[in-house]
Image (cartoon, helix red, strand yellow):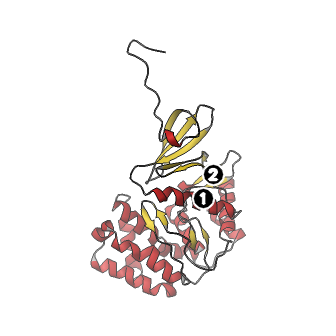
Amino acid sequence: METPFGPPDPPFVPAPHLLPGAAVGAVPLTGGSVNEVWLVTLADGRSVVVKTTEGLPAALYRREAEGLDALRASGTVLTPRVLELGPDGMVLEAFDPAPADAEFWERAGHAVAALHGTVGDRFGWAADGWLGRLPQRNPWTTDGHAFFAEHRLLRYLEEPLVRRVLADGERADLERICRRLPDLLPAAPPVLTHGDLWRGNVVARPDGAPVFIDPAVCWMWAEADLSMMFRTGGVPARFFDAYQESRPLDAGWQDRTRLLHLRELLSSTAHVGDGYKRVGELRATLRAYR
C-alpha cells in the first residue's frame, strides 16, 4: 500500500542471485567473524542461511561446502546441506541455536567421538582450505608432530599481526615448543576432524539432533579438535563425558589441550591482533613451555 510519502522500501535481501526463490525478509545472525550471515525468509515460508562477504576468495565457499559434504559422508555427524553455491557466497539449510541442556550435548559428544573414529593414513587434506580469512595449509604428511608444528603453528609467524605482537624471544619460544612436540604430545593417528570445533559451530535440528557447521576439515589428531571445544568454554561437561564413553581418551588429555590450543590463539592473533583479548593467554602459554 502506498502512503503519503510514497511506497514502502522493499525489504533488504542479501545476495538475491543466490537464493532458491523470492525472499520477504532477512535478519542478520551473529557468531561468525568472517562472513556476513543472514537468516532469510523465502516467500514460500522456508528459512535459509545466506553467507556472503565481498573480497573473500571464491574457493573459500567451495572448500566449506566440500568440508560439510565430507563430514556428512562419514555417516557420523549431521551438517547443513548447501542449497546454492557461488563465488561470492552460499545458501544453506537453516537450523536452531544449540540448547544448553545436557541431553543435546551428550548427543553431540557421542557424534564427535564417532567422527574421530574415522581413521586415515596421513595428516592433511586433498586441498588447502581456510580457517577464518586465512589459508589453512593441508599438505599430505606422515608425521603428525611435523604437520602440527609447521602447518598449524609456525605458519602464523609470517602473518603481519603476529609479527607485530610477538617479540623475538616469544617467536623463539614457539620454535622451541615445535622442536619439543614429540616429547610434549603423544603420537596419535590422523582422524577426520571438524577443524573449527567450538560451541558456536554446533546448532540444532528441530528434533534436537546436533548439527555441525563452518568446518575447516582435515585429517588430524582427535585431541586437536577437542582442545578448541574445551578451551573456549561454554560446553557442558556432559559433552566430554559422553565422548569418553564412546572413545576413551588417554590420561592427561585435559592438560594437553593448553598446548594444542596454541593453534587457535595464533589464528585469532593473526586475524585481529588482540581484538579478542587472547594475546595474554598466548604469551602465558608460550612461557609455560619454556
**Residue at 54% across, 84% down:** 143
Q: In which quadrant will I find the C terminus?
A: bottom left
Q: Find residue 68 and name its label.
A: 1
**Residue at 43% across, 75% down:** 153
Q: Is residue 198 visible?
A: no
Q: Position of residue 18 (x, y in %)?
A: 52, 43
- Mark 2 neighbour density, 10 Å: few (under 14) some (14–19) many (20 or more): some
Which kind of residue does numbered mark 1 sit on? Leu
- Mark 1 neighbour density, 10 Å: few (under 14) some (14–19) many (20 or more): many
Do the residues bearing badges 1 and 2 touch, measured as CB atoms within 8 Å? yes
Dot 1: element: helix
Is residue 185 rendered to the left or right of residue 207?
Answer: left
Mark 1–mark 2 distance (CA, rounded to whole Å): 8 Å
Q: Position of residue 194 (x, y in %)?
A: 58, 64
Residue nearer the viewer, 226 or 253: 226
Is residue 162 rendered to the left or right of residue 109?
Answer: left
Q: Can residue 237 be seen in this view?
A: yes
Residue nearer the viewer, 275 or 135: 135
Is residue 186 rendered to the left or right of residue 2?
Answer: right
Q: Find residue 81 and name its label.
A: 2
- How many numbered marks appear? 2
**Residue at 40% across, 49% down:** 54
User: Which comes before the other along the chain, label 1 or label 2?
Assistant: 1
Q: Position of residue 100 (x, y in %)?
A: 61, 51
**Residue at 58% across, 61% down:** 67
Q: Find residue 243 and name its label.
A: none
Which kind of residue does numbered mark 2 sit on? Arg
